[in-house]
Structures are given as C-alpha cells and as structure tokens.
Amino acid sequence: MRVFLTGGDGQLGRALRRILSAYDLVAPSESEADISDPRVARLIADARPDLVIHTAAYTDVDGAEAHPDRAFAVNALGSRHVAQGAADARARLIAVSTDYVYDGTKDGPYREDDPVAPLGMYGASKLEGEREILKAKPDAVILRTAWLYGEGKNFVETILRLARERDELRIVDDQRGSPTAAADLATVIAALWRTPCTGVYHAVNAGACSWFEFAREILRLAGLDRRVVPIRSSELVRPAKRPANSVLDCGKLAVLGITLRPWQDALRAYFRERGPVAP
C-alpha cells in the first residue's frame, strides 16, 4: 500500500512515519510540497497513493489573528488542494482537524454533531478546511483532536523548560481538555483506514483535565518539585481567545471498536520513551 503523508515533519507526522514505516510512504517536506500551492493536487495524484493522510496545517493560534490570509491559505485552500489530489488519485483520505471549531461554551463533552462556532481565525480556517475537504472528497474521514503533544515543540516540553528556569509556574486552570499523545492518534489513523467509515470523528485520549492539572502531572512524572499556581485565562493577554471546554466525546469512534487509553497512561508512556528529564 502506498501512503501520501502531508505534514510529515510535525509531531503527528513523525509519529505516523514510525507507524507506517513498513508501507510505501511518500512524505515530502513542506518545501517540497507546499499545500497552499494548487499544484500539490497534481503531486499527490501523480504519486498514485492508496491512502492520503493530511496533517499539515498552520497551527499558530495567535499568529492566525495577525495573519488570517496565511491561515486560510494553508488550512482551508491547502486542504482543498490535498482533497482534490486524493480524489484524482481515487485514494482514501484521512484529515486531521481541531477542537477549535467549537466555542467551548457547552456544558459537557462535544459530540460530532454539536454546533460549530470558532472563536478565532485558526478555528475558522480549520473549519473551512473541513468543508473544503468534504466538498472535494465527500467520503473523506476528518478527525478532530485536541491538546496534541509528541516529538517536537509541545506543552509538555514547554513546562519542563519553564521548570528549569523558574521555581514557580502560573498555569491556566479554567480551560479543560484531553491531552492527546501523537503516538496514540497515529495508531487511531492507522486503524481507521481499514474501516469503511466516512465523515467526522473525535479522537482524543480518555479523560479530561485543565492545563494546570496537566502541568502538575507533567512535573510529577518528571520528578520536578515546583510550585504551580492556578490562574484564569483573563490574566493572560493573548490575541486569540481559547475555548474553555475542549473535551471531546469519542463515542462515535468507539462504535468502530477504536478507543484511546486515559491521558495519564499516554503521558507516562511519553516519558518512558522520552528518557530522563534534565534537572
């Protein structure tokens, strides 16, 4: 089986490259395949893949407020180009989206059929990307995920860096979500292509916490004794507003027999693979 992967240098892309190493994998770099360029559709079609996995995205949430044209060029138009390439190749398409398509005001986990209402340009551009994908490739699978971390720059590594620099960390405690390991999401994607499913699914590690609770667990597993102070989102000045509730219901995915382990277990596995933490 031949797989075409966009975003292969990102956190999820790296995890997928490890899982899919036994397949005929085509994973061009961003410079080799700029998805905002319409010509990427022909590049994909010419590769004749059986499966296209679309993880490339503009993910700078605050930067999207200052540069909405760039966010939409990558996340919306780029997704259209990838979907068109998959359609021309008659390949299956699995694309990754985000919890930021919701406004975070719901009392309880979000289901796939809940109303979407992005708070900022990043979420809006990703939502438009979903729509572009389904227009060009109605049988595509879209996976909405949240709070992703893996090899590369992520919240876990940021907390570890801050812990080396400071004795006290101030972390937001009024935003809740499900920390999701890139390795686990990659496993879900690898399992999904074997099913005949189409449409939108949620995929996050089980359970939920606040960023404050997540940070405390990171420090505990790292063996770092630091004071962590809970703060409200309003105490941080950021260009983009974040959803207060990013908890996603994965019941639709479970019907396919695919479940993700608790986020605490996934985080422990991340530390085992990562190795010792520098004091």
Image: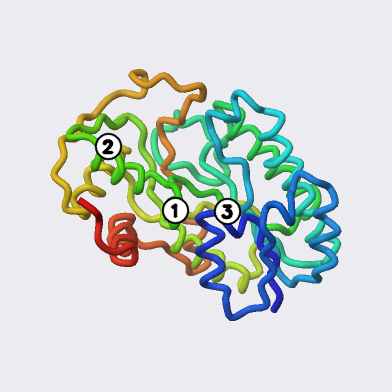
Q: Provide residue 88's location: percent of width, then percent of height.
A: 86, 62
Residue at image point 76% right, 70% down: 49
Q: Earlier in the sequence, mark 2 or mark 1?
A: 1
* Residue at numbered disc 2: 212
Q: Earlier in the sequence, mark 2 or mark 3?
A: 3
Question: What is the quadrant of residue 6 in the picture?
Answer: bottom right
* Residue at numbered disc 1: 204
User: Which residue is nearer to you in this view: 72 or 142?
Assistant: 72
Q: Provide residue 91's location: percent of width, then percent of height.
A: 76, 67
Vertical order, 22 against 242 (above or below) = below
Cα–Cα span, label 2 and label 3 = 26 Å
Determine whether, in the image, residue 274 is placed left or right of residue 105.
left
User: Which residue is nearer to you in this view: 125 or 31?
Assistant: 31
Q: Provide residue 176's location: percent of width, then percent of height.
A: 36, 37
Q: Name the element at disc 3.
A: strand
**Front label number (2 vs 1):** 2
Q: Can residue 19 be seen here?
A: yes
Tell me the amino acid under the disc marked 2. Answer: Phe
Determine whether, in the image, residue 210 is placed left or right of residue 80.
left
Q: Provide residue 82's location: percent of width, then percent of height.
A: 76, 53
Cα–Cα span, label 3 and label 1 = 9 Å
